[in-house]
Amino acid sequence: MPPSTPSSNTSGPHPQLEGDTSFPLPEFQLVPRARFHWRAVQNAITNATTATPFPLSLLDPHVVSNVTTGLWTLASEDIPRALYGVQKRIDLLGNDYYLAHIYRTLFWWTRPTHTTVLGDLIGSQWLDDAEFDRRSHRFWNRVFKGGLRVDDALTTTGAVHGPGHEAVYEKASSHLEPLGPDADPAWARRIINIAGNHDIGYAGDVSEARIARFEREFGRANWDIRFQHPPMQFGVNGTAAALRETVAPTLHLININTLVFDTPALSEEVQAQSYEYLNDLISERLYDVEDKSTFTLLLTHLPLHKKEGICTDAPYFSFHDEADKEGPEGVPRWKADGLKEQNHLSDYLSASGILQGIFGLSGDEDVPGGGFGRKGLVLTGHDHTGCDIIHFVEPSVQDNESVDLDGEANGPEKTWKWAARRYYETERFEKTPKETPSIREVTLRSMMGEFGGNAGLLSIWFDAQQGEWDYEIMMCPAGVQHIWWGVHILILITLVIGSAWTILGLVSGKPQPGKDLEKPKIGTSSGHGRSEAKKKSSKGQESVRSRSKK
């Protein structure tokens, strides 16, 4: 039996929309600066006129100094700054349409069932609310035009618990979204947005207000949903068709905000809510680890922990030296010693919260499923250059010996630890990922132009012959933004030249290329000449006849 119809996903990692924070301040724009210089000259003339009558006061050294200083400042600072502002506005406009070109082209070409953006939707967590709203508007109306925010009614698993929440929560936990022919067509246009550090900050500066405005514009930061494939029959453990069972495979999609897991956090309330969500997810909504009919797709911004040298970003943590003293209305934006920056989730949370907690992986063979855990995949962002690795259980032997109750040594104690290596280097090792508990993590390369305009194409399907899910993922680079700019500049030049040629042709009245020249008409004088010749000929014939009669 062939594999089932796949569920396809297009992933766009961190577009990071920039905005007016890169423009000159309003008071430093060209018109205000020109008015500033003109007022300085006027004041100098007024002061000089009190001692010297006008227009001789124009020659006052103070007036001349203000005029020359103003002109020099305009030429050397103000005009270049204004030109830079114009160039920056054009650059931002072009960047928006470049990113829109990536989304629009891939949507037309691949017809995905789902689309996700893996964090860093905008360029900075420090924006005021007005600028945040402007960039959000550009995100939905220019870059991802036609895209839809995932409605809160579909993401109630991530809602903050409150009065009467139990009934809604229980209904959401058991809800299954259909895949295949009965799937909701709106999912193709819904954008699954992941919270990134440029959207809400790191744990040390994530506030309730930043979470609230992100969720208002882009959807909840924590939620999960399960999609159900139409029922299928498959051979048990790959046996013949005579021994078959019917199953309705499910795909569990999890969107989790790992940015607030590590400490110290600015808001203990926000951190507690995320931990509560994680614990509810693990205890209430994950299927049994031995259930091969389910696939777990985890979407998050921060990559999992891995040692230095495997990916571009090495493990890194930094902390605020002192508390913020310039927060709006006296409210500090961070606290002293709060988490300021990190490249990866901490090793403890990566192991206990994600690898063991969500995926059920373990080096202990006595746990359910033998430690092989749930079938799945992790998609992350943050590292702009991207990375593709395998997290796996690595056996290790400690030097210390275990001792029994009688005090006798039992030999070295066998333990295991988590390790990671590049996915495409697995053939160099003795054990393949299928022979040891493991999970693949793909950190998608950025869709920003300087990194090649990348998007990830993920296809997931249920293989009825094997009785389990399978997937394939690949990167699709659109090329650097200079290619997009070059094509559109060439189109613009062609349109300008073509329009100018047409207008000049119409104004000059000259024949246009490709049109036949008008052929000259034979005038009436030519016909008159033939008539006169005919008359002379007849007269000559009459003369001959008259002479012959004589």
Image (cartoon, helix red, strand yellow):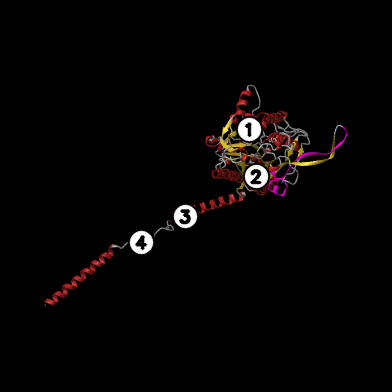
Tag 2: amino acid: Ser
In this view, which residue lies farthest toward the top?
163
Name the foreground residue: 28 vs 297: 297
Residue 379 vs 513, above or below: the answer is above
Residue 24 visible, this angle: no
> Mark 4 or mark 1, which is nearer the start of the sequence?
1
The CA distance from mark 4 to mark 3 is: 24 Å
The CA distance from mark 1 to mark 4 is: 79 Å
Of badges 4 and 3, the one in the foreground is 4
Mark 4 element type: loop
In this view, which residue lies farthest toward the right?
407
Rate crowding at label 2 as few (under 14), some (14 to 19) or many (20 or more) other CA atoms within 10 Å: many
The CA distance from mark 4 to mark 2 is: 65 Å
Give the left or right position of residue 71, taking residue 544 as reference.
right
Name the foreground residue: 542 vs 466: 466
Q: Which residue is under mark 2?
A: 446
Tag 1: amino acid: Asp
Magenta residues span 406-433
The CA distance from mark 1 to mark 2 is: 24 Å
Q: Which residue is under mark 3?
A: 504
Q: Which residue is under mark 4?
A: 519
Rate crowding at label 4 as few (under 14), some (14 to 19) or many (20 or more) other CA atoms within 10 Å: few
Tag 4: amino acid: Lys
> Mark 2 or mark 4, which is nearer the start of the sequence?
2
